[in-house]
Image: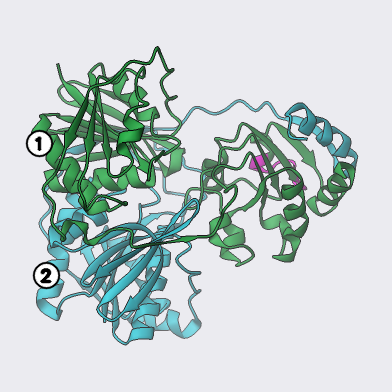
Chain colours: A cyan, B green
Amino acid sequence: MRVLVCVKRVPAPGARIVLTPDGQQIDTRNLGFATSPHEECAVEGAVQLAADHGGTSTVLTMGPPESEEQLRYAVSVGVDAAVLVPTDGSDLDPQATARGLVSAVTALEERDGRFDLILFGNESADAGGYQVGVRVARALERPIVSGIKDIEIDGDEVVAKREIPSGFEVYRLEMPAVLAVREGLNLPRYPTLPGRLKSRKAEVAAVDVAFEPGGQRKIGFESPPEQESHTVTLGEGVDAVPAIVEVLESLGIR
Amino acid sequence: MTTALVLLDHDRGALAETTLQAVTFAASLGFDTEAVLIGAEAEAIAAGLGGLGISKVHVIGHELLTDFAPEAFGDSLAQLVVVSGAKVVTTTGSDRGNEILAHLAAILDQPMVANVMSAEPGTPWKLSRIRWGGSLFEHVELDASFHLMTVAPHTWDAPDPGPSAELPVDHFEPTLDETAARTRVVDRVTLHAGITLATAPVVVGGGRGVGSAEGFAPLEELASMLGGVVGCSRVVTNNGWRPHTDQVGQTGTRIAPDLYIACGVSGAIQHWVGAMASKKILAINTDPEANMMSKADYAVVGDLHQVVPALIEALK
């Protein structure tokens, strides 16, 4: 089977986000970059599916030239082929992103054949628009379910499980299909040394597309107001236990 | 007057916790607000929506809409939007809310703004939304013929119920074929019969400081004594110490317990945005400078491996 996984280069999650003085961008001078966490699992999923069912995995990103770093990382953990859809680094809203991806996927499929499964992350870590996968699937007229944490292939169908508070919902989609997956789908592997070496030499194919802006335009960013610290220190070590018990009692928890 | 449709997210008759917050948001726009319910059991919910500032309820029913089906829900909503003439559609930024509105936006080829905090209608509309799970705000302008927005959970309260009044109910049957219903729930797996991480009144969370899978045993014991459940940070799931279903954070579960006891959790932004809706936070950490310690309501400077067992003994 042919699996495509779409990823996005984002500032490394977990870091404190500082803005440029004009509030237009995140100050990335002191930040590392990574693949959005949901998409790290999508990459691992693509590698596993291609290995388990025979076939190839392809990673694609749309972004500035530096996004090659995320493509090479995906190759270092086992993805077979890498595709960059270059942008000039300016902001693309979700509509523009989806339109560009549809053009790129269509071009790749015309060249090398249809992808049986296209994986997206449920939402990017930075913009969090929750829609690019859905828009692409709709444009390609393929079924899609979001929030997927388990994938199994059953003949020409994919059985996908989505987590809800009480457990899982099960969906069955005929391929070609699209899934938007979540972290927890698997535990992504780390690159091996041979993997790293291979990824350095890997060819990154470029697919150029024309960009058509969507209807959402960023005016600027703002950091949330700092919450004033009002921490009450209950004490040190086991000596704090009576104070903890008091807190539990005051909250009616005990 | 402009009408705003508010899609109410429900699972087989149970409204999502944050659903009605979208009604308050819609009211803030100054438009006439009408609710939309899709699928089985919608009728029963519609009967209880009086007194919330909603002027009408649209109930979308079809034999293919018995259980959740994201594509068919999107198609149905799009048909209602066209028929009703509404130009504004909003819903809560829950998993389903974001998903259904994304389908609607794709069908109408319109922008959709996810996790909106506030919106100011005009030419163009100006909106504020959250990014990074809530650790960054973004201001956007919208050039659109339909304004489609999901509401960031917990930025608005549900409306205060006023005197209950009977609401007009409008029944709508969309045109759907099997293709639309090809993505639908075909089975369910129930894992948690009791309280869950998202709804637990007490969460005992562990971070890197717990050190191992085995290290969670005392946290489990404390959680069960307090009627709560165990949660953890992303480091813990990445190390394979706990399943991902236990992860609190931007890429895990958002919790909102009465008390969150964070043990050995540094409090990176990714974790904090999942825990910040907790009513009270007690942090136990050897590092008094840890982010979680300065954000918590109560802090204990100490080793969780000593403090937690001692607390368990004291509670016995």
Q: Distance between the residues labelled 1 and 2?
A: 33 Å
Q: Please give the residue where the numbered disc 1 appears in the rendered image.
A: B82
The local crowd at label 2, few if under 14, some if 14 to 19, many if 20 or more residues have their Cα within 10 Å, is some
The local crowd at label 1, few if under 14, some if 14 to 19, many if 20 or more residues have their Cα within 10 Å, is few
B190 in magenta: no
Secondary structure at badge 1 equals helix
To which quarter of the image does residue A218 belong? Answer: top left
Q: Do labels 1 and 2 share a chain?
A: no
Residue A186 location in percent, x, y? Answer: 47, 69
To which quarter of the image does residue A133 belong? Answer: bottom left
Q: Quadrant of the C terminus of chain A?
A: top right
Amino acid of disc 1: Val
Question: Can residue A23 be seen in this snapshot?
Answer: no
Amino acid of disc 2: Ala
Left or right placement of residue B251 versus residue B292 in this view: left
Residue B214 location in percent, x, y? Answer: 74, 65
To which quarter of the image does residue A175 belong? Answer: bottom left
Residue B86 location in percent, x, y? Answer: 14, 29
Q: Please give the residue where the numbered disc 2 appears in the rendered image.
A: A107
Tag 2, which chain?
A: A
Query: Looking at the image, which residue is at 69% across and 39% down?
Result: B293
In this view, the residue farthest toward the top is B163
Secondary structure at badge 2 equals helix
The residue range painted magenta reads: B285-292
In the image, residue B246 sits, relative to residue B120, either above or below, namely below
Left or right placement of residue A177 versus residue A53 in this view: left
**Observer-nearest residue: B212 or A201?**
B212
Query: Looking at the image, which residue is at 61% across and 66% down?
Result: B239
Q: In which quarter of the image is the N terminus of chain A?
A: bottom left
Query: Looking at the image, which residue is at 14% across and 35% down?
Result: B81
**Observer-nearest residue: B11 or A146?**
B11
